[in-house]
Amino acid sequence: MLIVGCGDVGLRVARQLLPRVRLIALSSSPERLPALRAQGLTPLRGDLDRPASLARLAGLATRVLHLAPPPGEQPGGWWRDPRTLALARTLRRRTPPRALVYGSTSGVYGDCGGAWVDETRQVAPRTPRAQRRVDAERLVRHLGRGGVRASILRIPGIYAADREGGTPRERLLKGTPVLEAADDVYTNHIHADDLARACIAALWRGQPQRVYNVNDDSQLLMGDYFDLAADLYSLPRPPRLPRSTAQDALPLVLLSFMSESRRMDNRRLKQALRVSLHYPTVASGLLAGG
């Protein structure tokens, strides 16, 4: 199995699969190779931004987990994902893998006004980042039409105590405001360990050309999420602001998350992939040290 984008989630997948599966991890950083080897993976140098460096990937693995994000904005193709394009072209050169799982984002749905969202909903990305993810999904589907059992995971906010920036504690300590209840948005979450288990389930049980929402059972407004975390950590709850004031007080990146509201339906994750969540709610994950 080949892991492309072997960061925190990729390493969690590796820990759950080793030593039963031989794992190869693509890395563009020579400094990371010893650390990957120490984790029991076989590191392979290659850079998705340099397609010629990927030649050895062709015909190498029977299963591929693609967790690499698209690049940032680029002139002339701000909505394209050249990294996924380079990977797909390489994998088609020889015997393609039996299965490929791509880790996308729930941001492809755009703002849904707090409505329930299942995998049949038409995508409506509102940010360049989400538009590049839609392009990556298109490329993965095209690869699937060539005989690869391709699955797409749409992933919301990932958290875990042992993940860098993986809990709301730091933001609470900074006292970063949240929106007033009348302006608040629904947010979705998944514990990093449950996400790793979903990746593995999709690699072996995912249906061809199938999309899966990968989120827990929580139905929380963003402000309520931070209030819950503050109470669990015995920290002050964050201040509340109306949206009109928040636009002047918060960074644009944070405001972009506060402009989209949806409640993701995870029935396909649990019924079709048969994933039983270890942390079915944010409360259970945070209480367990998540």
Image (cartoon, rainbow, N blue to C red):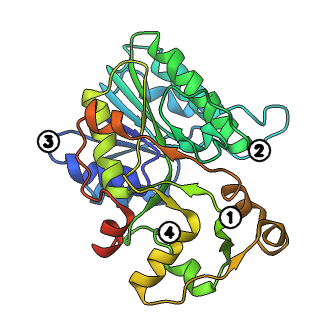
User: Which of disc 4 and disc 3 is earlier in sequence?
Assistant: 3
**What is the crowding at mark 3: few (fewer than 14 residues within 10 Å), some, or many (at least 20)?**
few
| Image quarter in which the N terminus is found | top left
Q: Which mark is residue 169?
A: none
Q: Is residue 49 visible?
A: no
How dense is the environment of label 2, judged by Cα within 10 Å: few (below 14), some, or many (20 and up)? some
For badge 2, the amino acid type reads Glu
Residue 124 placement, left or right of 24: right
Amino acid under disc 1: Ala
Q: Residue furthest top?
A: 146
- Please tell me which of labels 3 and 2 falls first in the chain: 3
Pointer 2 residue = 73
Q: As drawn, is 171 to the left or to the right of 19?
A: right
* Residue 284 or residue 155, whichever sits in front: 284
What's the distance in space between the residues labelled 4 and 1, CA to CA?
Answer: 15 Å
Provide the secondary structure element on which disc 2 rests.
loop
Which residue has dot 3 on it? 20
Residue identifier under label 1: 182
The location of residue 119, given as percent across then percent down, is 48, 30
> Which circle, 3 or 2, is nearer the viewer?
2
The residue beneath circle 4 is: 225
Element under label 3? loop
